[in-house]
Structures are given as C-alpha cells and as structure tokens.
Amino acid sequence: MRTLDDLLADGVAGRPVLVRSDLNVPLDGTRITDDGRIRASVPTLRTLSDAGAQVIVAAHLGRPKGGPDPKYSLAPVAARLGELMGAEVSLRQLPDGPPELSDGQVTLLENIRFDPRETSKDDAERGALADELAALTGPRGAFVSDGFGVVHRKQASVYDIARRLPAYVGYLVRAEIEVLRKLTKDPARPYLVVLGGSKVSDKLAVIDALLPSVDRLLVGGGMCFTFLAARGHSVGDSLLEADQIDNCRRLLDSGRIVLPVDVVVADDFSAEANIRTVGAGDIPDGWKGLDIGPESVTEFAGVLAGAKTVFWNGPMGVFELAPFAEGTRGVAQAIVKATAAGAFSVVGGGDSAAAVRALGLPEDGFSHISTGGGASLEYLEGKQLPGLAVLDAAGPND
C-alpha cells in the first residue's frame, strides 16, 4: 500500500486531501473526557498542513440514529483539534460543496454518521456518499486513511472512498499495522496476553486465534466468571454467559489460561455498595464480582515479570468506579514494569487505553497504545480488514 510519504513526494501544496481520522472520543455533555484519539491524529494532519495541503477531515462520533443529533456533534472535537494544531479548525456540514480552503488550512466535516449512507449495507448507497466526498476534493484530490479504529468497517468514508481517489495510508494506521505485525510474526518470548472486558463471547474468536501461539493468557474482567463457572465454581450474581461454559472448558484444557484466585465482590453495582474480597471459588449468592482481587494482581504480576511480549485488551474490573479499579491499576503497573525491563507491550485500545489515562498511568510506560480496540482484535484474529484490504488493492496510478 502507498504511504503518506509517497503522497508527500508527489507534492501536496495547494492540493485538497481528504483524511479519514478516528476522532470518536468520550464526552461528558460537550466536555471531552479523553482526547487520546484526537492527539493521535495530529501528526498526519500537521504534516499535510505544513506541506501546504488543503486538508478535509472526515470522522464520526458515537452511533447517531439515522440523522443529525446535537449530542453527537463534532463541534467539541473541532475546538480541541484546533488547540492541538495551533490553528482554527472549522466545522462544516455535509453536503456543503467543495470547501474554499487556503493552503495548509484544516476543516472538519460534521459527524459523517449523520448520513445513514455511511454505514449502509447497500453498496450503491455507500457509493453515492463516497462520490460526494470525492467531489469535495475535485480532480486533484487524494485520500489518506488514518483512522485505525474504523479500518475493520466497510463504510463509505473508510472503504468506498479509497476506490474513488488515489489512496494512501497515514502515519497512525501505518504505525498500528507495524505494531500488530510484531505480535503475529514471531514475537519475542515469553509472549503473554491479558484479556478482560465483559463477555467471553466478545473475545472468543481472538482467544481461539491467540491461544496456540501464546505462552500464557491471563483472564480478568467480567468474562472471568464464565471461566470460573467452567471450573465448577459458584459465581453468585456475577456476569455469566451460560452458553459459553463449554467453550471455556475447552479453552482451559490448553493449560495456558491463568484465572484470578480472588475477586472483589459487592452486593450492588455501585461505589457505595457493601464490598468484600473473597476467594474466586467463594462468591456468595446475591453478590457480584466487579474486580480481580489483590492476590490475583500479585499472581498476574509475577507471571508478567518475565514477559518479553505483552498484549493487553480489556480492564480487569469496573475501573470507572474507584472501589473496583485496583485490579486494572495493578496489572497495568505490572505491564509498565515488564516494559521497563525490556518487554514489548501493546495496549489494545478501547477501554484499556481509556483506563491507562483515567487511572493516571504513564502512557510512555507502554511500547504502544492502540487507538482501535475492535480493529486490533480482528487483526489478531487474522480477519481481513476492509479498510486495509482496499488500500492494498489500490494500484500505483489509481
């Protein structure tokens, strides 16, 4: 696939360039609570701006239902992006005709998902929107794919547009691919994977894909309770996917899965609930596990201490509530220590990346923090990602 450096070599001064970024950040009203994805998008945008390109950015926020919704407006994102770029970033509606931009100027299109054609399953509908996006750049336009968090989606601004304009991969997406290749092509050993999150069903495919190639796979989060149930433990009122118990037994037969030995339980899903720490096999009825316990953190940290490669996806507990954040904090700190000792560590985006920042952990304590949780997992599963496949297929003269 062609890179942003190839585009720069061709010359971009005075040339309109459409960039698909991933600016899907969490909001509290209009306040951005984690700007990590915006910051990650800046290097590509700044490089194009500094080279004199007329930069048009397409992005989405949340999942609006079939039309414009003020709570999903990208206005706060445009303001924050402007602060990071050191120049005003205007927000434009679609359709609005080709923007009149000065060389080096950056404009952000309003939430591309306000147009239902963006996520349509109908090729013609998506194609019509892609035609409109291509028309914004005119005959000299180019497309740069730099939203890794959406490359696993077959959407108009990700896939179809790359078939209509000369297409290039941006710095962020290129870096993500290079990192994930290190995890799939002869990783340094011991290779350890830490998985958390709510449901086994969400992670089953990636566990099946990774388990033959990892040395240990550490499981926490809500998904651990289905594994504990597969071992015959009572899990009280903890999250349980009964239809996945047989799959968990099959996976446990590998001998490579490490489960918590104690858990933090509560009688209600709130920070004010009654809380206690119990053995992983001793969760009482009426109580639910909401974090791994301190002995589990110690055991997980001991396993991680010797790692040479670590991939982490999914928190160990409900880190958003202070009483249930210590499991995630402790495991993350263990990964930071392993990294300092020479391990190559990757945080697999999504809630894990949010936890790193929310818990005040050093971002530079990890080798790489991905911007795309779902995309990272699908890449590791070996799936073909439409937004990357279309770039691979693009010819040199497209």
Image (cartoon, rainbow, N blue to C red):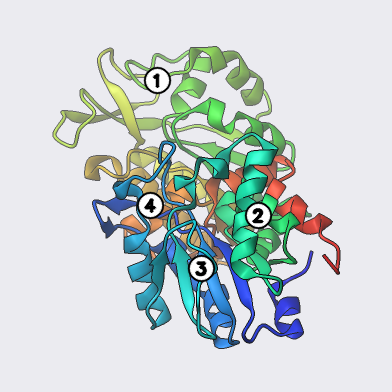
Measure the C-alpha gap from mark 2 to mark 3: 24 Å
Foreground mark, 3 or 4, reads 3
Q: Secondary structure at mark 2?
A: helix
According to the picture, the residue beneath numbered tag 3 turns out to be: 41
As helix, strand or loop, the secondary structure at mark 1 comes to loop
Image coordinates of residue 95 in percent, x first then y, are 49, 56
Residue appearing at x 32%, y 56% in the figure: 358
Check if mark 2's residue and mark 3's residue have beta carbons within 8 Å: no
Query: Which quadrant of the structure image shows residue 201?
Result: top right
Q: Quadrant of the N terminus?
A: bottom right
Read off the residue under disc 2. 131
Q: Nearer the viewer, residue 134 or 162?
A: 134
Front-most of residues 350 and 343: 350
| Mark 3: amino acid | Ser
The reply to whether callout 4 and callout 2 are in contact (CB within 8 Å) is no
Q: Are marks 1 and 4 in contact (CB under 8 Å)?
A: no
Classify 10 Å Cα crowding around label 1: few (below 14), some (14-19), many (20 and above): some
Q: Comparing marks 1 and 4, which lies closer to the viewer? A: 4
Q: Position of residue 160 (x, y in %)?
A: 69, 50
Residue assigned mark 4: 355
Question: Does residue 201 appear to the left or right of 185 in the view shown?
Answer: left
Q: Position of residue 148 (x, y in %)?
A: 59, 56
Residue 215 makes an appearance in the image = no
Q: Real-space Cα distance between discs 4 and 2? A: 39 Å
**Relative to 152, residue 1 above or below:** below
Is 265 situated left or right of 376 in this image?
left
